[in-house]
Amino acid sequence: MTEQAVRSVISQGALEIAGVTMFADLSGALFWEEPRLLVVADLHLEKGSSFAARGVLLPPYDTVATLGRLAAVVARHDPRMVIALGDSFHDRNGHRRLSGGDRETLAALQARRDWIWISGNHDPALPSSLGGMVANEVAIGRIAFRHEPTGAFGEIAGHLHPKARVATRGRAMERRCFACDNERLVMPSFGAYTGGLSIRDAAFAKIFRTPGFMAHVLGDTRVHSITASRCY
């Protein structure tokens, strides 16, 4: 895809958070153009192997699929920095179960760019051997990046895996979405095996405190912006 075509797709997902314009990528990543910063949330790598250890068999391809999608969006934007907003691994030991090939893919993604792992509730103690830096949260200007949303002004968080159910052409469609009211944002989960929480859930009402916040829904070819109260 040419750079012009990429920008044509991205421009349809422009979001404003605390006066800063960022772009919602159809993959579920967020791109801040000026510092060339890419943000992803809730990769939940090695979820399949975590379930298998408890006797629940899932196809063991989630890490490969998630890293493949991440590699595509990194190639598309060529960021200087990547921030992973917590729950990058599905459990505390998930990083130990990475295959050699997946470790190589991750190392290639981290090469020549800054990489920050935000601690999540599933992976609160990531080791330095993963590469990059580990932090509880990161502030850049008026924007704060953390795992669990607090409702603070200028906050970009993950954790809740927002999704929206909307009616279109006589049928219902349920998709991942960015939840945003121009002052704060909750990102969709990026992982291949992650579920979602309806933006009509009370958890979002506690964060946004107004029914006028928006669901920026990830469609097939563009981002659709819909008032959350219109979703069900």
Image: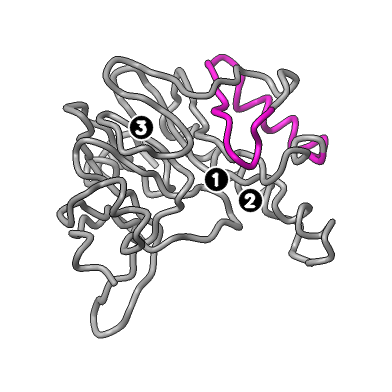
**Residue under label 2:** 65
The type of residue carrying mark 1 is: Arg
Front-most of residues 40 and 150: 150
Position of 103 relative to 132 (above/below): below
Residue 58 coordinates in the image, percent (x, y): 74, 65
Residue matched to label 3: 31
Residue 105 lies within the magenta run:
yes
Residue tagged 1:
69
Q: Are marks 3 and 2 in contact (CB under 8 Å)?
A: no
Callouts 2 and 1 close, C-beta under 8 Å: yes
In space, the residues marked 2 and 1 are separated at their CA atoms by 6 Å
Q: Secondary structure at mark 1?
A: helix
Q: Is residue 168 left or right of residue 212?
A: right
Q: CA distance from mark 3 to mark 2?
A: 21 Å
Secondary structure state at the residue bearing disc 3: strand
Seen in the picture, residue 49 relative to 124 is either above or below; the reply is below
